[in-house]
Image (cartoon, grey):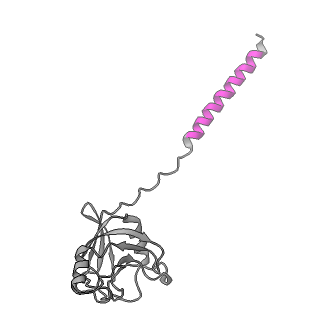
Amino acid sequence: MRRGDRGVSGFAFVTRAISVVAITLVAACVQAPPPAPPAPPMADRVVVHKSTRTLNLLRDGKVLASFPVALGRDPFGPKQREGDGKTPEGVYRIDYKSMQSRYTRALHVSYPDDNDRARALAMNADPGGAIFVHGLPNEYGPVDAPPWSRDWTEGCISVGNIAIVKIWEAVPDGTPIEIRP
C-alpha cells in the first residue's frame, strides 16, 4: 500500500465516523410526537334524577360527569301513555344513537319495557316509545344551556348541545340508563 492510499482510507474512516456520530446525535435530539391523550373513560351506567334535573354518567359506581337536564312538560310521575308529556321512570338501555334527528344528537332509550306495555294496556292506551336523551334543536348551535328554564320535551331528556356530544362519546350502545323520580 502506498502512503497516499492510507491517508485516503483514514480520511474516509474519519468522515464516516463523524457522519455516524452526527446522525446519532441528531436522531437523539429529534423528539417523538407526544403520546395521544388517553380516551375519556366510558360510562357503564347513566342515572337521571328527575327531581334534581340531573343526568350522571357513572363508571364503577363513581360519577364521571353530571349535566343539567330538561324533562317532559309534565315531568312528575312515570310515563303512562303516549302524549302524556311525562318522562318514563325505570331501568332501560341506551339501545342506539342517531344523528338523523332535529336535535344535535340523540341516544334512544329502550322504553317501553314489558311492565310499561302492561300498564298502558290496562289503561287501553299506547305506551309511546320515542324516548331519547338528546341535545337542543339543531338551530341553537353549540350552546350548553337552553334559552329557557323549563321542562319542554314530550317525555325525552334534553341536555345542552355541548353536553350531548360529551355524553355521545362516553356512552356506548347497551349502557343501562336508570331514570329515577
Stretch of the chain drawn in magenta: 5-27
Q: Quadrant of residue 67?
A: bottom left
Q: Is residue 104 left or right of residue 73?
A: right
Q: How many marks?
A: 0
Residue 166 visible to the viewer = no
Q: Position of residue 150 (x, y in %)?
A: 33, 89
Residue sitting at 65 percent across and 32 percent down?
19
Residue 124 visible to the viewer = yes
Magenta span dominant secondary structure? helix
- Of residues 82 and 151, the one drawn nearer to the viewer in this rendering: 82
**168 w.r.t. 131: above or below:** above
Is 103 colored magenta in this rendering?
no
Q: Position of residue 153 (x, y in %)?
A: 36, 86
Q: Position of residue 41 (x, y in %)?
A: 36, 60
Residue sitting at 52 percent across and 50 percent down?
33
Q: Is residue 25 left or right of residue 136?
A: right
- Of residues 128 and 33, the one drawn nearer to the viewer in this rendering: 128
Residue sitting at 35 percent across and 86 percent down?
154
- Quadrant containing the N terminus in the rendered view: top right
Q: Quadrant of residue 46?
A: bottom left
Q: Quadrant of residue 82?
A: bottom left
Is 13 colored magenta in this rendering?
yes
**2 w.r.t. 54: above or below:** above
**110 w.r.t. 11: above or below:** below
